[in-house]
Amino acid sequence: MASRYHLQKKEREIKDPNELLAIIKRGKFLTIALCRNNAPYIVTLSYGYDEKRNVFYFHSRQKGLKGEFLKSNPNVCATIIEDRGYIMDECAHEFRSVVIWGRMCFVEEMEEKKRAMDVLLCHLEDNPDKIKRESLSNDAVYRHLAMLRLDVTEINGKWGR
Amino acid sequence: MASRYHLQKKEREIKDPNELLAIIKRGKFLTIALCRNNAPYIVTLSYGYDEKRNVFYFHSRQKGLKGEFLKSNPNVCATIIEDRGYIMDECAHEFRSVVIWGRMCFVEEMEEKKRAMDVLLCHLEDNPDKIKRESLSNDAVYRHLAMLRLDVTEINGKWGR
């Protein structure tokens, strides 16, 4: 939504969904703003993006401050930054960025946990099957594995310098 | 505070203040979690760090969603990520990260605006005097310039893979 984005002179909104998707696919991690009782918190996590379902998956621990925040308030705002470097003598930093609004929760079902891990490994790894064969060959592994899902409600992007 | 940080096996807390400072000095931008009426928001900004005063300075617009959030709730949680790259076949991403808690506000006084811009340019630019000479040679420029200050209450760091 344009109203959520107050672009500066040096910035431009990315309107092309394919360009947004390309940034998401190139990215490896995103930074998430959480809040609880009006107190902010921030975490950075490796992600996998499920394009068909428009959700992000993350590997996580069951316990921890992030989980406590999410139980209190599942609404999050996350960002992926494609850093193209600072431009000396021009007081400018070249970047592409994506901002995502949505709700985040733990994945409960075994089948979705498996799919989530598959999405994550396929996003991050050049050869995901190798890790799957070596580390995820039986269901017991998944029982101790916590996965998070971010259901996207809105995505915006901009580039700037 | 250790209680705020739930480190995973692959992560280690950075306890050495000089190491934290080095990451802050190497960084060019940080990502800030804001919240208003328990709704999260996220922005990424170039920064300058004033080591003596333990504050971060940013160039900003007076108007915009970020300012509205800060007026409603000045408490922020920010992070600097030093991305050292994904390690293929190991399902691991090497990084250093700093998390900062504090309060953020607009700089009102002309003298502090000048100092803030000086801190920002000295942090970002190899030759800050050139830009100062060319673009900031008179006070009128500063009157239309909005600067933000983040007063740090706590900084933590970790490295991981």
Image: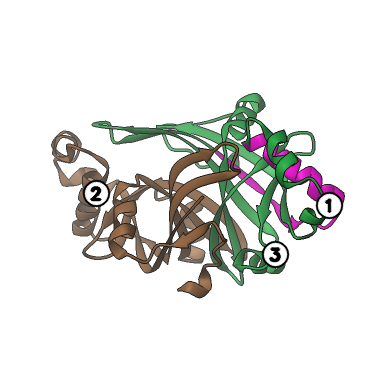
Chain colours: A green, B brown
Identify the subunit bearing mark 2.
Answer: B
Query: For this view, does B94 lie left or right of residue B108?
Result: right
Q: Which residue is mark 1?
A: A139
Q: Which residue is mark 2?
A: B117
Name the residue located 82 percent from the left edge and 58 percent from the top edge: A108
Figure check: B36 above or below A44: below
> Taking B106 as reference, is A4 above or below it?
above
Q: Quadrant of residue B121?
A: top left
The x, y position of residue A90, in whole percent, is: 27, 31
Query: Would you place residue A80 above or below residue B22 in this image?
Result: above
Task: Report the amino acid beneath label 3.
Answer: Gln
Amino acid carrying mark 1 in the image: Asp
Residue B76: in magenta span? no
> Which chain hosts label 1?
A
Q: Which residues are magenta?
A: A98-124
Residue receiving disc 3: A62
The Cα atoms of the two marked residues, 3 and 2, are separated by 43 Å
- Percent of width and height locating residue A124: 62, 37
Q: Is residue A107 visible?
A: no
Q: Which of B69/A127 is in front?
A: A127
Q: Residues within 10 Å of mark 1 (few under 14, many from 20)?
A: few
Q: Are marks 1 and 2 on the same chain?
A: no
Q: Quadrant of residue B158?
A: bottom left
- For the N terminus of chain B, the image quarter is bottom left
